[in-house]
Image: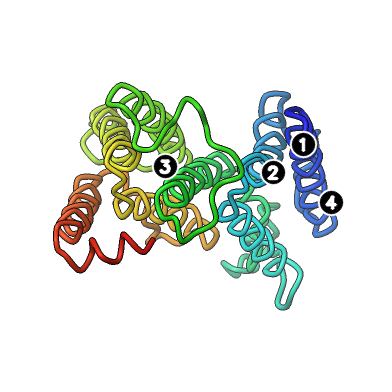
Amino acid sequence: MPSRRPLVISLVVGVVHAAGLLAVALHLGYAVGPTEYSLLGAGWRYGGLVVVATLPVWLALRYRLAAPLVVLVVTTGYVLGMELTPPGPTFRDVAELERLAEPTGITVVEDGLYIVRYMVNASVWTVGFLFLGLVEYVVRSTWHVLPAVGRTVPELPIPASRRRAAAVATTGGVLHAAAMVWFAARLGVTVSGGWEWALYLFGAAGMWVLAAVPLYLLVRHRLVAPATLLTLFVLLDARAEFTASVEGPHALYFGGWFLYLGILLVAGGVEYSLRRVEIYRRFESRL
């Protein structure tokens, strides 16, 4: 397949993905038309829906990586299913909920907004899909019982050199930190006492470390468990926003990142220990 063809096909699928979700959202009565946003806002939202589908499709066509595409299909199917099956979205004026005499003009949507939340959080989903693709790439490059990837990345041999692994970890950490800082700001994560700047500085540094460490262990030492758990944390964090609960996990993920880092390090230590016992070596030799 020519080098440009996978990208073109992926972009077409991404545009169709975005157009389909937006068409359903408009049909349901959501205010997601171009006139509702600034040029930058529309580009961020619509472009996010394109990119979040383009990346998994491109990874599937270019490298035969299946996991990101499967999760994309499941996620998009879940979003459409929740929107189009009963009870479906219900639009109610705040006056009805508060039992006020006069309508307020402020509308609350119940049992809906899945497409809207998927759209505005597309950057977080994209980071999760990217990490998932990297995990699958390393696993299928290491465990010979699994089908090999469609093609290898010349710049990323597995195991990677220290310099290359550091570059991957740094880049992944920056992407993770940028997405999660934006996510925290959008959700209004804050702290009392006027120390928000310290919270976001602490959180940004932590988000970088939280991604950089497991990604380095993945591509340098082929430790799969930490990066797999990191990817799971990212995807579950994004999924939790569909319900918009006050008990959403992102505040803990952002402010208490060191707890998650501890879990990742423990998982990596367990995997490393298993590698050193004879049972694991025999199992690995069969892979």
Q: Is residue 181 above or below residue 78?
A: above
Question: The residue tagged with tag 1: helix, strand or loop?
Answer: loop
Identify which amino acid the numbered label 4 is placed on: Ala
* Category of crowding for the residue at label 4, using alpha-carbon neighbours closer than 10 angstroms: few (below 14), some (14–19), many (at least 20): some
Question: The residue tagged with tag 4: helix, strand or loop?
Answer: helix
Q: CA distance from mark 2 to mark 3?
A: 38 Å
The structure residue drawn at horizontal position 35% and vertical position 31%, both measured from the top left corner, is 160
What residue is pinned by disc 3? 188
What residue is pinned by disc 2? 61
In the depicted view, which residue is nearer to us: 71 or 186?
71
Q: CA distance from mark 2 to mark 4?
A: 26 Å
What residue is pinned by disc 1? 1
Q: Earlier in the sequence, mark 2 or mark 4?
A: 4
* Category of crowding for the residue at label 2, using alpha-carbon neighbours closer than 10 angstroms: few (below 14), some (14–19), many (at least 20): some
Q: Position of residue 159 (x, y in %)?
A: 34, 37
In the depicted view, which residue is nearer to us: 220 or 248?
220
Identify which amino acid the numbered label 3 is placed on: Gly
Marks 3/1 in contact by CB < 8 Å: the verdict is no
Relative side of 223 to 18, left or right: left
Identify which amino acid the numbered label 2 is placed on: Leu
Question: The residue tagged with tag 3: helix, strand or loop?
Answer: loop
Q: CA distance from mark 1 to mark 4?
A: 32 Å
